[in-house]
Structure formats: C-alpha cells, structure tokens
Amino acid sequence: MKKIKGKLAIVTGASSGIGKEFCTRLAANGCDLVMISNQNGELKMAGAEIEKAFPVRTYTLCLDLTEREAVKAIEIYLDAHQLRPEILINNAGIFSFDLITETSERKIDAFIDLHVSAVTHLSRTFARRFAAGGGGWILNMSSMSCWMPMPGLAMYAATKAYIRVFSRALHYEMRPRNVNVMVACPGGIATDLFGLPTNLQKLALKIHALQTPEKFTRQALKRLFRGKQQYINGWLNRLSILFVGVMPTPVRMLVKTELLDKNIRR
C-alpha cells in the first residue's frame, strides 16, 4: 500500500457504503481522490470528512453514470483541474429483487447502463490513459451473484457476470502494458444496498454471513496492488460457488415461491 502515497484515485459510487470505505482506505494510505456519485449532498459531506481525517485532497464530482456523456464529462473535469489519476475503482451499482416481468424498462436500462456500459467505457478510457502514462490499477466490482442465476436476481446477476468476464479478459490485455485489472466478487457485505435492517446486519456479522466494508476493502486493495486478477472474500463464499453450480431446479424454485412471490404479495 505504500506505493500509492501521493497518487490519485477515481472512485465511483463514493458517497456511501463500499465506495466511501474504499475512499477512506485509500486516503489513509496517502492517496488523493476524485469521488464520483449522483448523491451530491452525501458526496460533499463524505469528501469533507475524509479531508478532515487525512492529509489528502479530495475532488467531488456529482454525476449520473447512466448518462451517455458521463465518461466524457469525467475526462473534461480531470483535464480542467490538471489531474492525472493512476487508480480507477468502478464501484457504483444498483440492486433490486423482482421478477423481470415486474421490472420497469427504466430499471432494466439502468442496470445495463451502469453495470455494463459505464464500467466498459470507464475501464477502456482509463486503461488507455494509464498505459500511456506508464501504468496503473483498475478494480471493477462484480458480485458473488455472478455465479447465481436465481429468480429475482436476473438483471443484477447477469450484469455482474458481465463485469467479471469483461474484467478477466481486460486483465490479460492490459498486463503487458503495466496496467493491472482486478475484479472483486464479494459475498454479503454489511451495507444498505440490499435493504437489510441494521439489526439483521449485526446478526449476520456475528455469524460471519456478512463481512464489514472495512475488512473487505482492505483485503481487496491489497490484492489489487499485488497484481491479482480476481478476489472472492472468504473461503465460505469460494466454496459456495461449487454448490450453486450443482443446485437442483427445485431448490431454485423455493427461492421464487418462498422469497420472491411472498415479497411481491406484500
């Protein structure tokens, strides 16, 4: 982690949750930040908190990454401020638990625009910039759900699977150019993304069903700067990939009837 002192990182989805924790962890190691989110108030507050806690500079950019010109807007902002990042963390994401037929076209487009289009174009743009500048690091956030074609998770799992496959291929393409691309596929993390109540989050942490954002981001960054290509947190999550692959259809249908259908009726 000593190698990042004085460098500049871009973090998307930086106003809360894992994104904010990535920013905190980077700042603690002397890294300046370009923090991007579509939550302007929370973003400015997060940037101010980090600057107060650590001797680093933060730049906050309120931006909707689903907009067509979002990547160009980031480049214009960087060039206007004469900023030269060497680290990119594509963390921004959305989640919903619903049937595809009950999911609005707008929400479906948001999954594709944010998890597929934005990640692809940001990775491409900054892979080229980093390579031209002598090297850099890109971390793309996938999910354990990329191995889990479960009812209710179709859009989330499918787009996160895209991120994983895309990032693994980009890793090999950019390795000869001194740009390390790593994909992180976390299991449950104790954030508000999935809407789990605080008391249940605390219980899940006690039984190790969830991991804290602090621990996850610390381990993910260590692996990124060691040149790893993929990170799955926890041996239980790595083991569960095997079980998910052989899970019979009746078990998957239980997820639909006992979780998804009942949730829709409420």
Image (cartoon, grey):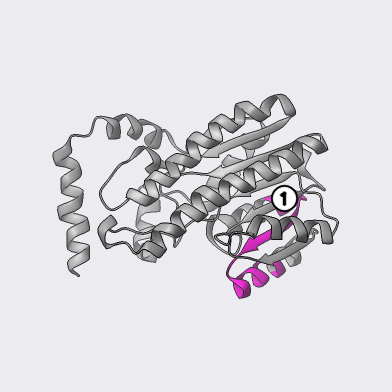
Residue at x-position 82% and y-position 54%: 83
Using the image as rendered, state which of residue 75 and residue 261 is in the foreground.
Answer: 75
Taking the magenta stretch, the answer to whether it contains residue 29 is: yes
User: Does residue 63 appear to the left or right of 161 in the view shown?
Assistant: right
**Residue that badge 1 annotates:** 9
Using the image as rendered, state which of residue 176 and residue 225 is in the foreground.
Answer: 176
Q: Quadrant of the C terminus?
A: bottom left
Q: Which residues are magenta?
A: 26-48
Residue 99 seen in the figure? no
Q: Quadrant of the N terminus?
A: top right
- Residue 131, x across and y down, in percent: 76, 35
Residue 134 seen in the figure? yes
Residue at x-position 44% and y-position 60%: 193
- Residue 113, x across and y down, in percent: 50, 55
Q: Farthest right residue?
A: 82
Check the image and report above or below for 136 versus 227: below
User: Does residue 204 appear to the left or right of 11 in the view shown?
Assistant: left
- Residue 226, x across and y down, in percent: 66, 31
Image quarter of residue 124: top right
Check the image and report above or below for 226 versus 193: above
Check the image and report above or below for 232 versus 204: above
- Dot 1: within a 10 Å radius of its alpha carbon, few (fewer than 14), some, or many (20 or more) residues? many
Residue kind at label 1, given as amino acid type:
Ala
User: Does residue 14 appear to the left or right of 179 in the view shown?
Assistant: left
Taking the magenta stretch, the answer to whether it contains residue 251 is: no
- Residue 96, x across and y down, in percent: 36, 59
**What secondary structure is found at the residue carrying circle 1?**
strand
